[in-house]
Amino acid sequence: MSVAAIATRSSTDRITAPLLAISDAIAAILLAADLVVVCVSVLARFLFNAPVEWSDDVARGLMVGSSFFGAASALARSENLGVAFFVNMLPPGVRRVVDAVGALLVTIIAGTVAFNAIKMGWLTTGQTSGSGLPLEWTFYPMGVGATFMTIFAFETLCGRPLRDMVAGIVVTAVIAGLYLAWDALAPSSVPSSQTLMLIGFFLTLFGGLPIGFALALAALIFIWVEGTLPGVIFAQQMARGIDNFVLLAIPFFILVGYLMEANGMSVRLIELLQRAVGRMRGGLNVVMVMSMVLFSGISGSKMADVAAVGSVLIPAARRSRQNPGGAVALLAASAVMAETIPPCINLIILGFVANLSIGGLFVAGMLPAALMALALIAVSIIFGKRPAANVEAEPRAAVSGLWTGAIASFGLIFMIFFGFKSGFATATEISAFAAVYAIAVGSLLFRELGVKSLAHCFVQSAVRSGLVLFIVAAAQSLAFILTLQQVPHAVGELMLAISGSHGVWLFMLLSILVLVVMGSVLEGAAALIIFGPLLLPVAVKLGIDPLHFGVVLVIAMGLGLFAPPLGLGLYGACLIGNVPIEQTIKPIAGYLGLLLLCLLVIAFVPAISTALPHALGY
Amino acid sequence: AWLAAAPAIIGRAEAAAMKMRCSSSLPNDPKYANGRVYYDNLVKSLKANGLGEQIEVTFFPDNQLGQEIDVINSVKLGVIDLMVSGSSISANLVPLVGTFDLGYLFTSYQQQTKAFDAGAAKPIEDALLKGAGIHIIAWAYNFGARSVLAKKPVKTPEDLAGLKIRTLPNPIITECLRLMGAAATPLAFGEIYTALQAGVLDGLEHDPPTIMASKFYETAKHYALTQHIFSPLAVYFSDTTFNRMAPKLRDGFLDAAKTAATDTRAHGLAVEKEALASLVEKGITVVECDKEAFRKRVLPQTDNFIKARPEAKAVVDLIRATQA
Ligand code: NA
Ligand code: NA
């Protein structure tokens, strides 16, 4: 899904095509190795009472490596997300120069990541990780992955027309030169490093630079301008932003999502729902909402869910002469609703950065999601029409083993929810077994998952999770800089002061506003990484239950992510449904208004979020 | 809008004062968290030394600046000036520091202080400065010895046999627990609570204040006072910062930092007792166990360690020769 595509050529006619194949293969193999390490370590502990001491370190190291190679492959295919809204309004000539500057910046940023990661590997040689393995093993694979990224970015830059390329280099050099001249001639009047960092961040972000790179560049601008921090600290923070066992659930649940599509579970599940409720009033819309509920209960990737459901149901909406814009809007709204249905990447990320129980967050999100799902279903039925008669005349793809498929899918949901209650594995480890289950079901039960499509699933998942985790890593490097400047502390004090004089309700509303706006500007995860640890301690001080507040933050961020005109999630849904964004704006405004109403109810009736986790002992 | 306002908020600090960053992995708890307690004591003794205006220390609790392994590397690089943490983390930089993690090396914290006063830690301090550019300004206590909290009473090594006990992901501590009889299970700290609840783990080993603060007493009810590790708390200081300071200011600072460590030691002993009493109140059974039986089983660990690192012998001998 390319939103602000910086590349101009397709991936097939690249000179670096063999390199891309290598990058794909490394990312997928590291992910597969990770799956094996986690499963073997759980089995050794459970069956033979012999925990594997190095498994945690190795699993995390493999994930860091896989993420950077996956992110490199994503960059080569121009899959990185960026804000296109503003650059689309520029005149074509200016736009081409802005894109060239972007391509140059991506090359410089990727090169800086590579250089500092390798230098950090060299500096930490001889040191050991927790379990006694060489520490540099984390940094060298990251450095090589980032080197691949640099090569792909450089080729993309060189693929532009010579005139644009030169213009881009000149513009970038002039901006850097102006700063250096200012700093040399009148150093006392130069804005502070924080100010320059902010200007650079918003300029590049609204100029269409992919989010992860805009975040990393902001951190780099600070390091360059401020002058006392070593560059390796940037690489260190990027690596550590994702070097955590809990985050392993992200690639594994994304893998589950792709496997479900490849192994035939998705089709069977949607078909079953269509037969059950598809013929009632507003039936197709109800099917769409319910499909999203089920899919997000299985996979961890929202975009995978949207793709799976959208690619089946949007064409069905077209066939039944429904407004496809309305259907895409409902798909996007359902994705917001499903934001807190476990397993969910954003809840995992929030739990990780704000030090909350991920199991607790999962449980806390269920009733709020149910409330929003009911609201969407009610609206679908009230405003829905009966399906046109000609739909029945449409030939339906014959699907074998409908019930077997559905039961297998529910088996997966059951396993995820109750697997870790049994003492077999932790919530993170269960994600690995969910992936193994999907592979087993697909290859043995349905016989639809061959070696080739399995390999393809691993590549796709590694690339997609590399994309997500690269943004997480970059956001961490910026969050580190902000923390060093004590920005979270200052903002926390400010918000406490405001709420102290006006009440907790104002703090809650402000938090929702911040997350909606920032969720729209940044890709969701980055907004949570920066604002989660900043707002949560304040909420706790004000007496708000942290699980309740966490759920509110994630839903608010989801609203922003799918809100026009900037929300990247909405662009994704439009691409999948093949509908221009203009057609969705009116219906999505209605749906998002409804969800905002639900969010306010959730925000001011804490019991909706806290009742379930308290009953289950979180 | 807040981001734009932030520089103005931060920019207010006095330009003249020397700024230092102090990091701790523990939460910002002024009673149970050793990092915060040390920081409070440091601010107090800096003021007492008349340096309150000249040195401004900012405290970063809760791993805000990264995981411990990153923070210790940042101390090495001079990005972070001070770090308050257990000795174990620096063993990843200089393996000799791992000596202090050996099971049943110390008999009590008071004995440890006597041994350190006699010079037992000197070779380790020298190795850390030479190998990683990190000074240890002072040693204090972790807030209690590490003991085993389990779902069933553990009195003897036989009781511990086969129990999945979470250990710090550290090869020496893992080996100690294995020698004691447990199936040592290294696991990330954040996963402990749910893993105990679900039965993935049968217990963990930690000090009483941590068990109290993290609510582990809700899921396992028997605290066996195995007291297998009394590893010290270290106040790490960057050599880069050390060299950046004017000698007079530095002497005043180091003196204040040492006084703060002494105060923290007294606080640590009191809090350990208090946390143990609170655990009993919360329904925990404190189990007196056969420490001698555990100690005998763990003894070969120290012998093997010395064989691999002969430079540890002087340290171990001096500690063993010190009476409580
Ligand atoms: Na999900
Ligand atoms: Na979800």
Image (cartoon, helix red, strand yellow):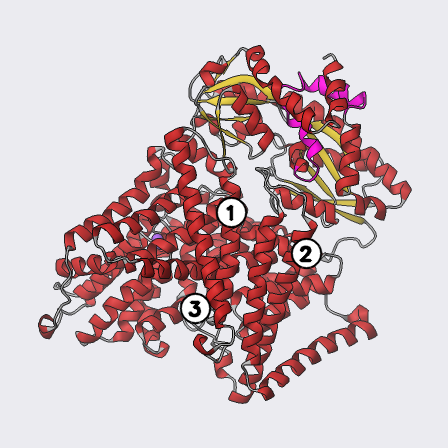
Chain on which label 3 sits: A
Q: Residue A186 carries which label?
A: none
| Ligand 2 positioned in quadrant | bottom left
Image position of A242 (left or right of B12): left
Q: What stretch is highlighted in magenta?
A: B92-120
Residue A592 lies, in percent from the top left, at 35, 65
Q: State the SS at label 2.
A: helix
Q: Does the magenta stretch include residue B107?
A: yes
Tell me the residue that label 1 is attached to: A60
Residue A309 lies, in percent from the top left, at 27, 63
Image position of B95 (left or right of A352): right
Along the polypeptide, which appears first: circle 1 or circle 3?
1
Q: Is disc 2 in the same subunit as disc 3?
A: yes
Tell me the quadrant of the picture where the N terminus of chain A can be found.
bottom left
Along the polypeptide, which appears first: circle 2 or circle 3?
2
Tell me the residue that label 3 is attached to: A567
User: Amino acid type of disc 1?
Assistant: Arg
